[in-house]
Image (cartoon, rainbow, N blue to C red):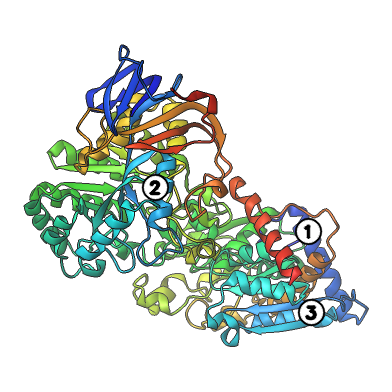
Amino acid sequence: MRTLLKNGRIIDPSQDLDIVGHLIIEDSQVAEYGPDVNVDDVDETYDCTGMWITPGLVDPHVHLREPGQQHKETIVSGTQAAAAGGFTTICCMPNTSPPLDNPALVDYILDKSASPEAGGVFVAPVGALTVDMAGAQLTDLYALKRAGIVAASDEGFPIQNSSMMQQAMEFCVQLDLPVMTHCEDTSLTKGASMNEGAVSAMLGLKGMPRSAEEIAVMRNCLLSLHTNCQLHIMRVSTWGAVEMIRQAKYLGAPVTCEICPMHFTFTEESVGEFDTLYKITPPLRTQLDIDIVLQALNDGTIDCISSDHSPHASHEVEVPFEDAPFGHAGLESTVGVTLTMLTHKGILSPLETIRKLSTKPAQILRLEAGTLKPGETPVAQVTVIDPECQWTFDRHKTFSKSKNSPFHGMTLRGKTMLTFCGGEIYRDAFYADERYSINE
Amino acid sequence: MPRNLLGIRHLSADDIQELLSTSADFKLRIIEDKPVPDLSKQVVGMLFFENSTRTRVSFEQAAHYLKMKTANFAAGSSSMSKGETLKDTILTLRYERLNGLVMRHRMSGSTSLAARYFGGPVLNAGDGQHEHPTQALGDALTILERKGSLNGLSVSIVGDVEHSRVARSNAWLLSKLGAEVRFVGPRTLMPSNMQHLPGLVHYDLRSGIEGADVIICLRLQKERMSEGVLSSIGEYASMYQVNRESLRWANRDCLVMHPGPINRGVEVDDVAADGDRSVITAQIENGIFVRMASLYWVFTSDPKPAPPPTLTKSAAKPKESKAKKTAVGAKKK
């Protein structure tokens, strides 16, 4: 079986490649690509004129909610949403119920994600750092790693005790396991639900001060510097956090970080009249933060973009603001929002956009993904994006079980058209039928 | 869309003037035993999820004068304690055919949520630390009766501003009608960013009430001590108490107000609370008339009322359609 992706703009940040040409997938592997490949003798042809052909996208931060919270999302629906979003490898977070703190659960997730009903993407589990994510006792990280986790994290319940965090990092250095962490000093955010600022003061909501995030970023960066533990900071939102990460990198700490589209799109003002769709942690900040964040995306201080896909059922979101859970469903809007807010505004070049959505997160978590080089991934992982497709994001037309998206109704420019992981796993309704042909 | 009273922030100066003049009119009629409008066809639900004596009794009185029926709802014994969500409780009351709701809840913004799912008008009787609009209306009426106008008056709001819905509603109302508002209190009880709230911040009592025409004292909740934001009640009192000595800094005819319940000896002393400048009892009484006016205002709104508080553009539409869908489904049952 020879599949031709014809006449697209081939963007592969892993080799700094940005050329117009064709790409051949043969026997589930990328066979060759370039302007001069043999386009005869193919079995099927996808016309990619005007589109980007990129390595399958990699999302370092997804909540699949299974086991235990299947009313929000399942591994099946979540992986289907990932495929529709253009992601071929996603990292799932351990804050399930029970938390992902033992190897049997890792097996369960890997089995489920490989089942035929699932979306066909690779799922790379992130294990809990401490038992029950309670911050008291380390999990059996060696067994978890052998079961297949790619990193360890206590996600939304970050370890508060610095000594405990240091121990965890030391242990992970030994196991050569990256630590991912959400940065929050929870003693400063008790009962808080949005950014501490002008809007929280007006609405009478308890605010999360920026120092709550920055203290934790600084502590974790210092622990990483001194233990030499590879640290990936999830979701930065303040200019101060960005500057500290910049400094830590300068000092040589093995630190990377990510941002989710909400944090470069919205500010605290978006909360409006207590709109729970804009409740996220760390919270939406101010325009000044966005300005610095955009610079940091441009200069590479912020390494990658994650969807921070946090699905929640409607009944959990339609509650008073302080009762609402944090986060939004993001897998299917991330490409559109990133291209609209960053690429088309000149913040990121197409090559850098794809680096942040694919190659870099794969490198950080050492995943076999994020490249088009033949043989470097288990099967061909290729995403085709139409950067000019204008569409309106409709949360009711998504694969995700949850509809808690603040991007609903937004007009976006840029959309995933095709996703290949081995074979085709997703074809978008916007991708015209005439563009596809089977050669007899 | 029915007319709601969710907060002063959402009202125009004209709306506020209308409410206040209606209140004054109702007060005169009640005192002179003249007829007031008859709203006896309306049943209003009294939803007090949080304890309240004065506001609840005041709304009951207001409804009584307007011959309205009230349906009481005790949060403790309701299905809320069985795990029902606020949304479902509100939808239930909607299909119990209540015409309106008076609601108090400990969470900021909860009355906006209720208004989204309840078909008729919703009146906010205090939502968390957000707003308490009828308290502000009563306070404004009390000031107006004594000063004639709010325009150009200097009003100081003293105390725990951060946790006070009364402070927020009063600041909006007074500033919309031309008064100059000062917020006075310790840094630990003042929001760190007051950019969106109308008023100047003073951390020192003297500069905060110097030349004031009105001082609104706020209640200091005792649990603030355990949160570590204040060292002791004694220290707070010595720095921020409105009393015989500190009142000298204000104007000679300065009014002393307090939304109650009062912690005597903490935020005010007896001289300030009971002296001839105190209008605290008048505030309580006027509360009834402004609540009458509020009920009248929401229940007799013309068919094209003022737009409701703005929802964020992307979220507004689907939410409405969702509520509608539920409504159709429920009717079929």
Please report, as a chain letter, where disc 3 is located.
B
Indicate which label's residue lies in the foreground, 3 or 2: 2
Q: Amino acid at mark 2?
A: Gly
Circle 1 residue: B17
Report, in whole angstroms, how far the alpha carbon at label 2 lies from the one at label 1.
60 Å
Q: Amino acid at mark 3?
A: Ala
Q: Residue B67: horizontal and vertical position, in percent?
A: 85, 81
| B297 is higher (above) or lower (below) than B102 | above
Task: Confirm or deny contact between disc 1 and disc 3 (CB under 8 A).
Answer: no
Q: Give whichever of discs 1 and 3 has the lower sequence position.
A: 1
Residue farthest along the right direction in this orientation: B34
On whether disc 3 and disc 2 are found on a single subunit, the reply is: no
Quadrant for the N terminus of chain B in the image: bottom right
Position of A404 with respect to A366 (left or right) is: right
Circle 3 residue: B63
Circle 2 residue: A119
| B237 is higher (above) or lower (below) than B8 | below
Position of A68 with respect to A215 (left or right) is: right
Indicate which label's residue lies in the foreground, 1 or 3: 3
Residue A252 in sight from this viewpoint: yes
| B78 is higher (above) or lower (below) than B20 | below
Q: Residue at x 78, y 71 (%)?
A: B295
Q: Residue at x 44, y 76 (%)?
A: B237
